[in-house]
Amino acid sequence: MGKSKNQEPGITWRQPDGRPVSCEEKLAMLNENLDEIREYCQEAFEDALLMGCDESQVREVFESIVKAIRNPYAGKKN
């Protein structure tokens, strides 16, 4: 069984119970969102480097942003 055309290489999107997400529309949306995040982060990263920021610090700031994202659905059933 090969990867779907909507599947991001190396990523199997999983549900909380560990089962893979299989809906093609959901996979397409998840991967489109990931592509947009990647592109925006790359642009912001390059801007920071061009403005003389330290690469390690920029990466740490990006990581802290991801770690600070809150789950508005915690404790709720989907």
Image (cartoon, rainbow, N blue to C red):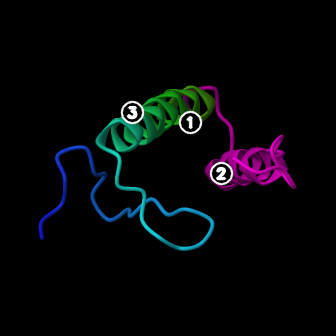
Q: Which mark is residue 59?
A: 2
Q: Nearer the viewer, residue 3 or 52?
A: 3
Q: Which residue is mark 3?
A: 32
Rendered image quadrant of residue 26: top left
Looking at the image, residue 60 sits to the left or right of residue 31; the answer is right
Q: Classify 10 Å Cα crowding around label 1: few (below 14), some (14-19), many (20 and above).
A: some
Please identify, in this view, whether the residue under mark 2 or under mark 3 is nearer the observer.
3
x 53%, y 73%: residue: 18
User: Mark 2: few, some, or many residues within 10 Å (few <14, many ≥20)?
Assistant: few
Q: Is residue 73 magenta?
A: yes
76 on left or right of 38: right
Check contact, mark 2 vs mark 1: CB within 8 A: yes
**In percent of the image, x 19 and y 53: which residue is there?**
4
Percent position (x, y) of residue 42?
Answer: 48, 35
Disc with the residue nearer the chain's start (1 vs 3)? 3
Residue that badge 1 annotates: 45
Q: At x 17% / y 46%, what residue is drawn?
A: 5
Q: Amino acid at mark 3?
A: Glu
Task: Identify the element where label 1 is drawn.
Answer: helix
Q: Position of residue 15 (x, y in %)?
A: 55, 62
**Secondary structure of the residue carrying numbered label 3:** helix
Task: Return the disc, 2 or 3, that comes first in the chain's sequence.
Answer: 3
Q: Is residue 15 above or below residue 37?
A: below
